[in-house]
Image (tube, coloured by chain):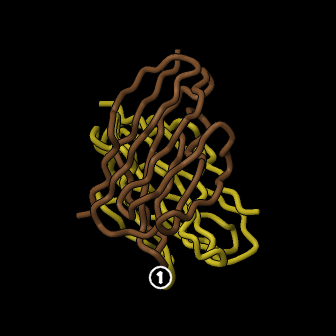
Chain colours: A yellow, B brown
Amino acid sequence: AQSVTQLDSQVPVFEEAPVELRCNYSSSVSVYLFWYVQYPNQGLQLLLKYLSGSTLVKGINGFEAEFNKSQTSFHLRKPSVHISDTAEYFCAVSDLRSNTGKLIFGQGTTLQVKP
Amino acid sequence: DVKVTQSSRYLVKRTGEKVFLECVQDMDHENMFWYRQDPGLGLRLIYFSYDVKMKEKGDIPEGYSVSREKKERFSLILESASTNQTSMYLCASSLKGTDTQYFGPGTRLTVL
């Protein structure tokens, strides 16, 4: 069975500081990997995704993530955060074998950016 | 732009009531999903549908049913609402053969 673990439930950080949100996954088959963001009182929005090719993926709003197959990780990073980045972030994997489009989500990480 | 809409942003119901949550997407997507979101648990899949009148159970289907009579609409039904179904409900859709899901704004349901 596949699973996703987000190692931090909350990450407080000061404005303009760098941030890393950690995600590890478990799967016996190849997967696609996703990061979604949920701003307060909104649905989820796709931040970036890894399907194949370069292991460094760039997304919207200056975020990027690196796929590391040997460590089964897909950590999200931003070199300098803004107050507006305060949100909940979800890591997800899909099962390439199932062809159902289903995603398995992690527990979420709340990023709190302080002035 | 894909648009996924949900019938209500906030809903308050009483224990035992039958509750309908509606979701509509406007991009002709084959796949549609219902999740519930609870603090510390992330998103958990309740049901999904990959075609009209087709449905499959997700990870937590107990106490819920779904209906998909038209391609653009996917309804979640709580036959007899209970207080432990108080939660945020999120609908999503995706194109067949792809994995990127597009989400609605969510319905926060409170069962008293």
Quarter of the rendering occupied by the N terminus of chain A = bottom right
Name which residue lies at 46% across and 28% down. Answer: B109
Which image quadrant for residue B95?
bottom left
| Depicted A6 relative to depicted B87: above or below | below
Report in which chain the residue with disc 1 lies: A
| Depicted B78 relative to depicted A29: above or below | above
Quarter of the rendering occupied by the C terminus of chain A = top left
Name which residue lies at 28% across and 38% down. Answer: A83
Q: Is residue A68 left or right of residue B25?
A: right
Q: Is residue B83 left or right of residue A2?
A: left
Q: Is residue B2 left or right of residue B69?
A: left
Which image quadrant for residue A77?
bottom left
- Res. B81 visible in picture: yes
- Res. A16 visible in picture: no
Name which residue lies at 55% across and 64% down. Answer: B54
Q: Residue furthest left?
A: B1
Q: Nearer the viewer, residue A93 or B18?
A: B18
Q: Where does label 1 land, which residue?
A: A54
Query: Tag count in the figure?
Result: 1
| Depicted B1 relative to depicted B44: above or below | below
Name which residue lies at 67% across and 67% down. Answer: A72
Q: Can you give x and y, in whole percent of width and height, for residue B11 in the image? A: 39, 26
The 10 Å Cα crowd at callout 1, few under 14, some 14 to 19, many 20 or more, is few
Identity, as a three-letter code, of the amino acid under mark 1: Ser
| Badge 1 element | loop
Q: Residue furthest bottom?
A: A53
Q: Can you give x and y, in whole percent of width and height, for residue A34 in the image? A: 49, 63
